[in-house]
Amino acid sequence: MPIFPSPKTKTDDDFELIQAINAGQTDLFPELVFRYERKLYNFGMRMCRNVQDTEDMVQDTFINVFKYLKDFRYETKFRNWLYRVATSTCLKKKRKSKYAPERELSLDEFIPDENAELPVQVPGWATLPLDQLLNEELLSIIREGIAALPEKYRLVLVLRDMEGFSTAETAQVMGLTTENIKVRLHRARLFLREKLKTYYDHGA
Amino acid sequence: MTMVHDHNRKDCLAMFAKLSDYIDNELDDLTCKDIENHARACIPCKACMETFRQTICFCRSLTPNEIPVPTAFSNHLKSLIQKLSGQKRDL
């Protein structure tokens, strides 16, 4: 059976704090910043890939949250709403700075060639425990692989496999359907698998 | 070692398309069983499934918040927020 269980729904840990801020205790807003500053900064570094854009994104996100928190209706967890604001800020920034169309990933490009010679056993790197494999070189290959993903695929992979959002939450954050999220996630993972396969095939 | 793949390619492609849904536990039991039976009989697909699963494990093993926020930026953010907190939010 699959090894990863579906993420469980949790209660919103930020509920009381947001209620207090919205009731007029705006001096508590720095506490909200303190809770999410590092998370958003790391999310920004994965998405924007440079310090200046990341800092701009984090700052603009908190300003927008401050302005619009009063409109937050608890229809979703605060964290999901925050990441929706951050994602939208990030994408707007990208559109301003680059006009080149993004590369699309298709399932076909990852299908093994019908005439290629195929493995007769599972490669060792897929069977060993993580602690026997992970080292600085591999971590850097993984990070480079993620950074090389076209943005719309990278965003889904980061939200799902690194930030721990469920498929439904990621769909909510990105304003897309769950089917769309699944398609992008699958292609992003296949892209990354190819990078790792190439790394190991060339004698890592 | 490699071999020429002689298994039913249609089944292989069907499995290939569903790997993420399978690993994320988003398929019904019957489809999961079909995938598991296929992977048992088809070594290349088993290899594909395990390398795919390991790829996801690698991603999930990355420390999500490993980079500390630079002190200068954190201080700038604090002062900006304090300034905002002192103002009305609808300004």
Image (cartoon, helix red, strand yellow):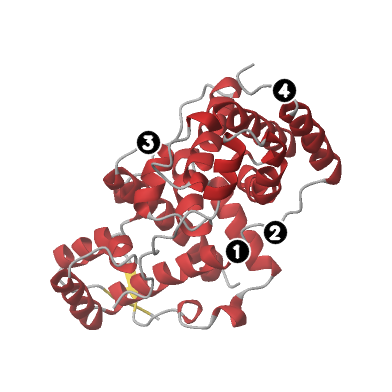
Identify which residue, A43 or A190, lies in the foreground.
Answer: A43
Residue at x 72%, y 37% (from the top left corner): A27
Q: Amino acid at mark 1?
A: Leu
Please report, as a chain letter, where disc 2 is located.
B
Please report, as a chain letter, where disc 1 is located.
B
Q: Secondary structure at mark 4?
A: loop
Please indicate whether residue A157 sits to the left or right of residue A137 in the image.
left
- Give the spatial CA distance, label 4 vs label 2: 33 Å
Residue at x 46%, y 82% (from the top left corner): A127
Determine if marks 4 and 2 fall on one subunit.
yes
Please report, as a chain letter, where disc 4 is located.
B
Q: Which disc, if any, is residue B66?
A: 2
Mark 2 Cα within 10 Å, few/some/many (few <14, many 20+)? few
Q: Is residue A189 visible?
A: yes
Task: Tell me the quadrant of the picture where the N terminus of chain A can be found.
Answer: bottom left
Please indicate whether residue A142 sits to the left or right of residue A157 in the image.
right
- Give the spatial CA distance, label 3 vs label 1: 26 Å
Task: Tell me the quadrant of the picture where the C terminus of chain A can be found.
Answer: bottom right
The residue labelled by disc 1 is B62
Mark 4 Cα within 10 Å, few/some/many (few <14, many 20+)? few
Q: Position of residue A3 (x, y in %)?
A: 37, 75
The tag earlier along the polypeptide, 1 or 4, is: 1
